[in-house]
Image (cartoon, rainbow, N blue to C red):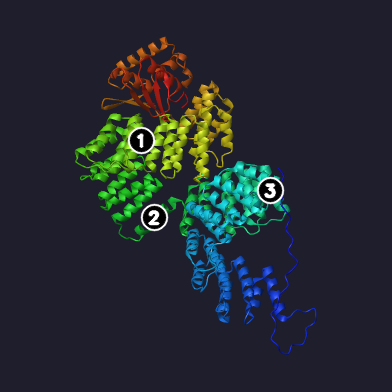
Amino acid sequence: MSVRLPGASKPATAMAALSLPSLPNRTPPPAAPASSPPKSTSASLSLKRLCKEGDLRQALRLLTARAQPPREHYGWVLDLVAARRAAAEGRQVHAHALVTGSLDEDDDGFLATKLVFMYGRCGGVDDARRLFDGMPARTVFSWNALVGSYLSSGSAGEAVRVYRAMRASVAPGSAPDGCTLASVLKACGMEGDRRCGHEVHGLAVKSGLDKSTLVANALIGMYAKCGMLDSALQVYEWLQEGRDVASWNSVITGCVQNGRTLEALELFRGMQRSGFSMNSYTAVGVLQVCAELALLNLGRELHAALLKCGSEFNIQFNALLVMYAKCSRVDSALRVFHQIDEKDYISWNSMLSCYIQNGLYAEAIDFFHEMLQHGFQPDQACVVSLTSALGHLRWLNNGREVHAYAIKHSLHTDLQSSRHFEALGMFREVQKQGIKVDSMMIGSILETCSGLKSLSLLKQVHSYAIRNGLLDLILKNRLIDIYGDCREVHHSLNIFQTVEKKDIVTWTSMINCCANNGLLNEAVSLFTEMQKANIEPDSVALVSILVAVAGLSSLTKGKQVHGFLIRRNFPIEGPVVSSLVDMYSGCGSMNYATKVFYGAKYKDMVLWTAMINATGMHGHGKQAIDIFERMLQTGLTPDHVCFLALLHACSHSKLVDEGKYYLDMMMSKYRLKPWQEHYACVVDILGRSGRTEEAFMFIESMPVKPTSVVWCALLGACRVHKNHDLAVVAANKLLELEPDNPGNYILVSNVFAALGKWNDVKEVRARMEELGLRKDPACSWIEIGNNVRTFTARDHSHRDSEAIHLKLAEITEKLRKEGYTEDTSFVLHDVNEEEKIGMLHKHSERLAIAFGLMSTHSGTPLRIAKNLRVCGDCHEFTKLVSKLFERDIVVRDANRFHHFSGGACSCGDFW
């Protein structure tokens, strides 16, 4: 694609003739030579020339040398001051106008308006407001200057308020014009104020100003920034003949802002076909497209065009730098960086990010030192990037130095740990100085331990509190929480047992500690003990116990907790009602979950999201979409979590078009930047539909570097659809990103086993053993009556173990007569075929099924939960059991719910 940039336009050479006032009838001075203009004319020409050339110092000297300069002279100098944002010089001009009395004679507000505009551009919005409020008469230009002042200071909300005051004014000549509407529309875009934007659009149509290209361009920008790109495109289409380069720039930038980069690229092509030559602002917008889509060749063409026209603005260099960084051309990015004469924070931070994005962490550290040598004090973005590099390099000591630097220079970063280190330093300083430490300070230091997840520090603080007799009930409760966060449940339990008078916080902390660390039965037992101790649970305790019950898939216990709520007239609202929906769906009972949802008087975003998630996890994608659309009708705005639940629903039901549509809606309409999990859902949707190549192309086009969750999704698709080549790519990426995660090695092994690549399986397992990684033991549990029974693979610890294994053998024999054959490819151990079959028969979910069949009446549904994904052979086994024994079986594994009935599964054999 070729790109065109116009050459620099030639400056106008003609100058309008000056109209001199007539002189009083007096003896004229000696005539000047014909070639010399009058002195006043000469001074005007000189001042105008100086302002045009940007020589502010000389222009200011010439202006203040006159006792009574014409007010247009003030105007010229003030325009230059505003352009230079030279506040000090602006105040000199203001003072001179006061001394000469020029402001007193400013009947039409010309000079005051110029001053308002100047102060606004120079960041003195308060001065601008004071001047405006003191004006005896205000014109549309005065109002526009004040609106512009607030816009320049970033106070878009105040700009809108000034506009509303302007509309309410009955003074003649204060009706909004096209400049007013354009400025206010910009403010609406900055604020995301759709309502005001619609209002201004209506006024523009009513007054005929919508035909103005200036206003139409502002409308396009406003709608795009408010996430209403379709409305922006409608205005753009309506504009037709009135389009200028700014129109094209607005709509291209709008598409980029809303993540619709392909449309932006197509519009750019349309702009070229229409005969418009792009300018530097167009180039910046298209460079963003090149960065997002990694279009290196087009980016290079744009770079060449910018060099040809002599463009030297930092915004373009920074856009080029980002483009080369996203295209993994660090060398080119560095060349662009060195070409920037006046490097700003954006330039330095962009180059630093370039190194980090491309894995050059050591080079990033060196670049940071270079930045310091050039006198740039790192800001928040820089410190965050630097800490990321140090984290990848695992340079802990250097990380501490950066934290110290951030604290020393009072950088307000997003690095939560910086305040933790600061608090720790203060604590140690207090100890050195011999100042008495009280329980309140210990509480603050415990928050530091929690934030840093430092067990050794936590134990030190705990010991200090014991030695100094500072352990009160509040601190003990907090210690239970923090030890739980550090996965040291036994320490939490020891503290819990030392508390003589346990309050609701003590019980809730211990229940929550057990629930969060997988000790679900213990959490339920604690809840029962709490009731026996006559402690009335609060909403926090109830949410914790509902989470535990959902983890156990214990429908009976869940109903008991729900019944307790009803008997005590506990308000079923807020987090409690959403936890009930989660609990019932987690126990496999969508009927009860639905009843709770529709019975709630007030449905907030959390509850809607819980219902969407529950419906989707059970494989009812279309129903989840219906719930989402009903939620939108209530006026609620979906957040990241809500969209994630919706995309999961689309994924589990293979709703490809719907998944793409809602991802686009998330970005364009609601302006939410997707998380890695959102992208993984789309990859999963494409993979489930057999479109593995398209899924890979989607990953390649992602605007962010894909994480392990994305590659896991692709790997799962490759397993089902037997795509070996892509499986190798995904496996390498996954193990490269998380080389210490045993779950990844198991997944890769399973995929290669399913593809029959046994050498690859052996290589992966050998690598696991070399690294000393161990797979989490498989565990399944089933609720029978009021008891939850747990089984592990090859489990013989159950009191009825012999009967359970005999029942399982009986079931297997019946299935074989119906044509069942074990698929030993799911056994990854290098043993003979008979041993592999024996291993399959001892999988934990089969033991749970056998126990369920022998412990319940015919026709009773079975509900089973498993901590890992169900293997393919067990999945086939369960399908046949549901058919042969006429049982509905609900299995919740680590990924989703499987509803087995009549020999089929709700997942469609993809999970």
Gap between marks 3 and 1, in whole Å?
52 Å
Q: Residues within 10 Å of mark 1 (few under 14, many from 20)?
A: many
The answer to whether 659 appears left or right of 601 in the picture is right
Residue 41: where, in percent of width, then height? 71, 78
Q: Which mark is residue 582?
A: 1
Q: Nearer the viewer, residue 3 or 864?
A: 3
- Label 1 or label 2, whichever lies nearer to me, is 1
Q: Residue placed farthest to the right in the image?
A: 34
| x 31%, y 33%: residue | 549
* Residue 779 in view: yes
Q: Nearer the viewer, residue 169 or 827?
A: 169
Q: Amino acid at mark 1?
A: Asp
Give the total of numbered labels.
Answer: 3
Which element is circle 3 on?
helix
Which element is circle 1 on?
helix
Residue 449: where, in percent of width, then height? 37, 48
| x 44%, y 45%: residue | 637
The answer to whether 214 appears left or right of 906 in the picture is right
- Label 3 or label 2, whichever lies nearer to me, is 3
Residue 514: where, in percent of width, then height? 31, 37
Q: Residues within 10 Å of mark 3 (few under 14, many from 20)?
A: many
Residue at the disc numbered 2? 423
Gap between marks 1 and 2, in whole Å?
38 Å
Residue at the disc numbered 3? 302
Which element is circle 2 on?
helix
Gap between marks 3 and 2, in whole Å?
50 Å
Q: Amino acid at mark 3?
A: Leu
Which comes sooner in the sequence, label 3 or label 2?
Answer: 3
Which comes sooner in the sequence, label 1 or label 2?
Answer: 2
Above or below, 591 against 306 in this view is: above
Q: Residue placed farthest to the bottom in the image?
A: 27
